[in-house]
Image (cartoon, rainbow, N blue to C red):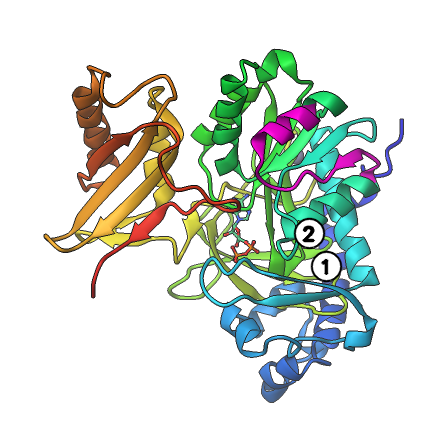
Amino acid sequence: MDSRYWQEELETMPRKNLEALQLEKLKASVTRALKSPFYKEHFGSQGLSADSLQSVDDIQKFPFTCKDDLRDNWPFGLMSASVDDCVRMHCTSGTTGNPAAVLYNRHDLDSWANLVARSMWSTGARPNDIFQNMSGYGLFTGGLGFQNGAEKLGMLTIPAAAGNSKRQIYLMQAFGTTVAHSVPSYLGRLFAVFQEMGLDPHKDTKLKRFFIGAEPHSEETRLRIQEMFGVKAYNSFGMTEMNGPGVAFECEYQTGMHVWEDCYLIEIIDPDTLQRVPDGEWGEMVLTTLDREAMPIIRYRTHDLTRIIPGECACARTHKRFDRIKGRTDDMFIVKGCNIFPIQIERVLMNFPEIGTDYLIELTNEQGDDMTVKAELKPDLFTDNYPELESLKRKIAGILRDTILVTPKIQLVPHGSLPKTEGKAKRVLDLRKQ
Ligand code: ADP
Ligand code: ZN
């Protein structure tokens, strides 16, 4: 069997050896980073260098790097290599403001593709699979990132890109797609188009695996996707600042995402005190690149909230796993003094079989603090003639009240009527006036 991307020696390395490898690579990354104008100032002014590191934990002496540091030093301020040496750039989708750019040299692209290939392999994907990438191409890393990884693994790769569901289905059937990648919020819509065409993905496709990621989603959403398509859906975590996809991925056991610790150093901090929290406790993820040449990034505050899952994984990989992202610190909104994450609302909605996969949370404050949860009904249920509508709304509002301690207004709308985006879903519409 071809096992090029089961990198056993690295993936199952005893923790002690893994930490020694991390220390060596961390020192090299800090030394490289110090070649950039930004880090020269950021670390150099405090006298910090690779010599400040006796152990991996000494990274705590170093200051954090924030998204604003990337934006303020846009586009080349964090570069440790010359632009001549680089062969690609990507930038963030700007979900939360101006974009941040990342540049890659050949080594970086190769290392990234290797991580994506390794990630996909860990779920069971093999060179004889047919891979369809339903992610936006272009500046978004989910396109070329998965493309290069899948090619490296050796799968026939269909760069279908986002949207155009009928064509996606046509390609899936024509080429016998077995593995596909997409943002989770698109898959409910894709399934509805299967239904409109009188097709059943279980019988009419060869799909076996989905990679879903790039946006927060609940376990309930994963289960729905698995049921709709008859596949196993694996959580894929990545971010542009850390290359893109392939930072962390669920293995075949689907018990949290292994972060590839030979290439990334993970820390979880309390976002208020900025101190590390022990494994098992929730906090903000901070990541450091260990294998990037053109643009190393040290102690990057991701704003993503998660926790390290203690214990070992059944797959024998020793790289730590982190839990499903609860949201970003900046996703959280406050209504009537209660802190709420969209994913808490999603989990409640997805437990109602009548509700489809799309929803929108609207916040207004013209008549006091108001929150409306708009949710699409399944295609065969219509708001006008569905008699149990009122009692369904009451049930949803009741469970939401118990979960988030606020009783929102519930609006159930026909399937397909909420606004759609091609990339990541927008779940909160904040119309509040200051
Ligand atoms: P932007 O920050 O503009 O959205 P990116 O496309 O680089 O640009 O997005 C990275 C972010 O996407 C992560 O910081 C995280 O918030 C989110 N994300 C990526 N993968 C996942 C995942 N599997 N689960 C939850 N959120 C994810
Ligand atoms: Zn595992």
Q: Which residue is mark 2?
A: 261
Q: Residues within 10 Å of mark 2 (few under 14, many from 20)?
A: many
Q: Residue at x 71, y 61 (%)?
A: 290
Amino acid type, mark 2: Glu
Q: In this rendered view, identify the residue nearer to me: 332 or 423.
A: 423
Q: Circles 1 and 2: CB distance less than 8 Å? A: yes
| Depicted 271 relative to depicted 196: above or below | below
Asked which secondary structure carries label 1, the reply is helix
- Which image quadrant for residue 361? top left
Can residue 63 be seen here? The reply is: no
Residue labelled with disc 1: 22
- In the rendered structure, which amino acid carries the disc numbered 1? Gln
Region in magenta: 153-172
Residue 76 in the image: x percent, y percent? 66, 77
In the image, residue 213 above or below residue 102: above
**Percent from the top left, x then y, of residue 189?**
48, 30
Q: Residue at x 54, y 57 (%)?
A: 93
Q: Is residue 170 magenta?
A: yes
In front here: 219 or 388? 388
Classify mark 2: helix, strand or loop: loop
Q: Nearer the viewer, residue 175 or 61?
A: 175
**Residue at horizontal 17%, vertical 23%?**
390
Relative to the observer, which residue lies in front, 40 or 424?
Answer: 424
